[in-house]
Amino acid sequence: MQNRYPQKPGAEFILKQAFFYWNKTLIFQLMFSIVFFAMFLTSTFFFADWYGIWGQNQALTEALKQGSKAYLEKMSELGATESYRMFSYAILATSVFLYPLNLGLFQIFRKIDLNEKIELGDLFSGYNGFNFFKYAGYYLFWVMIYRMTLPTVFLPVLWVAVTIFVAPLMFFMNKGIFEAITLNFKALGIYSVQIWVAIFVAVAFKYAGFFLFLVGGLFTFPFWNAMIYSLYKTVFSEKN
């Protein structure tokens, strides 16, 4: 971790840096969202039709008319069916496949730092060679833990905080998953205020575009990656 600042940089510095990277790459933010939602929605509609989920949704709508209790009971009943489980696995596989797109934005932000020419192919850097299997495997591990902790409300938020640096540490410093998580723990102890503020702002801004500007959400949805890169660049030194 860095020592080059006489004092730890504040949250304001990190936020300004994140917005700088995001603003400099708006066209790539848009391309990220178009690719992500086009593939995700296509997969969702295809597998919903394949496994007959539309019919189950109709049953949920009818149950909702009878009250929340009937709705929850019906949802639990349908959630236990084989078709719904297979649909859930298909959507999970789609999410895992799309995760390496995030690494492409890290590559683009790094090229800005190096004053190098950015190309469309940079957005797909996470799919080069063995990279796809490494990052897809990490995301599968990450999302399984996240889902298991969801009922606790607090633990999934903590899981986000203790893994926020794992992807860039793997991408830029070639760290293993568990070594990266250990480094993340140390960073969280030192930069806890900055990290928590960054998480709150990133999540709020990420979805604000959909609520306030609708199509603007295509630009704000990938903002999370700019915030992670800004934090990573501030906290870690690759010279170590």
Image (cartoon, grey):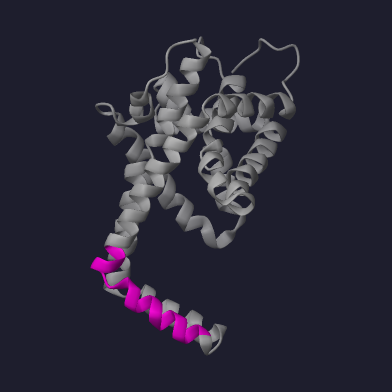
Examine the rendering and report whether any part of residue 229 can be seen: yes
Name the foreground residue: 240 vs 202. 202
Q: Residue at x 75, y 11 (%)?
A: 6
Stretch in magenta: 47-64
Residue 53 highlighted magenta (yes or no): yes
Residue 25 lies, with reference to residue 37, above or below; the image says above
Say which quarter of the image contains residue 107.
top left
Q: State whether residue 166 appears in this view.
A: no
Q: Determine which quarter of the picture holds residue 142.
A: top left
Q: Is residue 131 left or right of residue 176?
A: left
Whether 65 is drawn above or below 160: the answer is below
The residue drawn where x is 52% and y is 14% is 113
Residue 193 drawn at (x, y percent): 72, 34
Instruction: Tell me, yes or no, whether the highlighted magenta stretch contains residue 62.
Output: yes
Q: Looking at the picture, how far across and down is residue 137, in whole percent? A: 33, 40
- Main secondary structure along the magenta-highlighted residues: helix
Query: Which residue: 45% across, 86% down?
Result: 62
Task: Please state the horizontal and vertical placement of residue 92, each as a whole percent of the image.
Answer: 35, 54
Q: Nearer the viewer, residue 68 or 57?
A: 57
Say which residue appears at 45% left-offset and 23% top-offset: 108
Location of the N terminus by quadrant is top right
**Extreme-bottom residue of the structure:** 66
